[in-house]
Image (cartoon, helix red, strand yellow):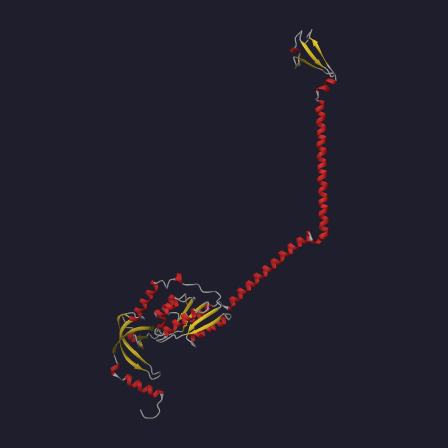
Amino acid sequence: MGNGILTVSEINKYLAFKVNSDNNLKSKLIKGEISNFKLHEKTGHIYFTLKDEKSSIRAIMYRSYAEKLKTKIEDGMSVVVIASVMLYEKDGNCQLSVTDIQLVGEGKINAELERLKKKLYDEGLCSEERKRPLPEFPRKIGLITARGSAAEKDVLSTLKTRYPIGEIIVFPVLVQGENAPLSIKDGIVSASKSDCDVLILARGGGSNEDLSCFNTEMVARAVAESSIPIITAIGHEIDTTLADYVSDKRAATPTAAAQIVAPDKKRLFDILQNCMNMLYNYTLENISSCERKYDNISNNFVLLGIDKKLVLNEEKLELSKYKLSKLTSDRINSLTSLLETKEAEFKQLDPMIILARGYSVVTKDAKIVSSSDNLSVGDTIEVKLGKGKFIAKITEIED
């Protein structure tokens, strides 16, 4: 290498030569935890990240070595790999070229994550019963994410298209790095004090390391304690963090979160149109009902006029008085005629009138004699005539 100006290619070429030729970096035993594990279906190569508490490095295991593995490799496993450090000139990145993988046990990071998850479940923070329903038509939507990030752009674009009437308030936070957990917690606390109806906590895709801040107890508790319903949209569809477990709703992506929180504009128009139709039909029915009532009132009263109505009522009153008087008179005449008839009948039954026609009443000892069998010769009888009476003595009895 000379003292002149170097190109990037020259630097990378020199570094690649130094690294790739260093025997101290060949076939080394390296301990770490597996993350971002992926088996390439076409080539059969295995790609993953090997990490510890402070650092990480990408790794590749070519098909010829991968086919010899006897154990299924998964994220979170603690392993020891046999690998050589390689540096590629094109991008200047280092990665491990792995020839074998041996399991050590469950990774510390994964074990800690499972411990925290169990703790949150035991406290009931992940139960479905405590998850709150989301508002159907939110007035204000709070977005907690990194300023200028792809997640912010996706959410804002989707909400603008689907739900332009909603007001969006962005609460910018760090979503990666050592200070991210505290920044996210403060953002959630600040958003919870706003007048938003729903909150979205979003971050675009990334490796497990990139999403690690959402797996902290600090962030998970901040999400659970939010006074406003919160949707988490962190990473890709396959990624699930502690924050997702305690949130009111998990979305696969930031775009999906925006679609969940905001009804589609077309659906809003359909709802409004249905409401307008219902209101129109209700108004028409009320108008028709009022018209029918008006017509009935008009036919009975209004068309006659007030004066005519009074005259009509007076005529009805006079007719009623006449009918009552006639009914009373007819009743009196009928009763009088009946009384006269009965009087005549009673007169015909008067004994004095019968005696006046030549009949008489014979009594013996104050008892009426109706048969000669009740008399004897020598009996004294009284004979009452139509006018006067006389006393007689029986001298002879004939049958």
Residue 64 visible within the image: yes
What residue lies at 28% left-to-right and 85% top-to-bottom? 18
The vertical placement of 112 against 321, above or below, is: below
What residue lies at 31% left-to-right and 85% top-to-bottom? 15
Picture quadrant where residue 48 is located:
bottom left
| Residue 81 picture location, percent across and down | 27, 75
The vertical placement of 305 against 37, above or below, is: above
| Residue 58 picture location, percent across and down | 32, 77
| Residue 4 picture location, percent across and down | 34, 93
The vertical placement of 126 against 370, above or below, is: below
| Residue 393 picture location, percent across and down | 69, 8
Q: Is residue 303 left or right of residue 65?
A: right
> In which quadrant of the rendered image does the C terminus lie?
top right
Q: Is residue 150 left or right of residue 102?
A: right
What residue lies at 53% left-to-right and 64% top-to-bottom? 271
Q: Is residue 398 left or right of residue 251?
A: right
Q: Nearer the viewer, residue 259 or 54?
A: 54
Q: Which of 131 and 221 is in front in this view?
A: 221
Q: How many marks?
A: 0
Residue 240 visible within the image: no
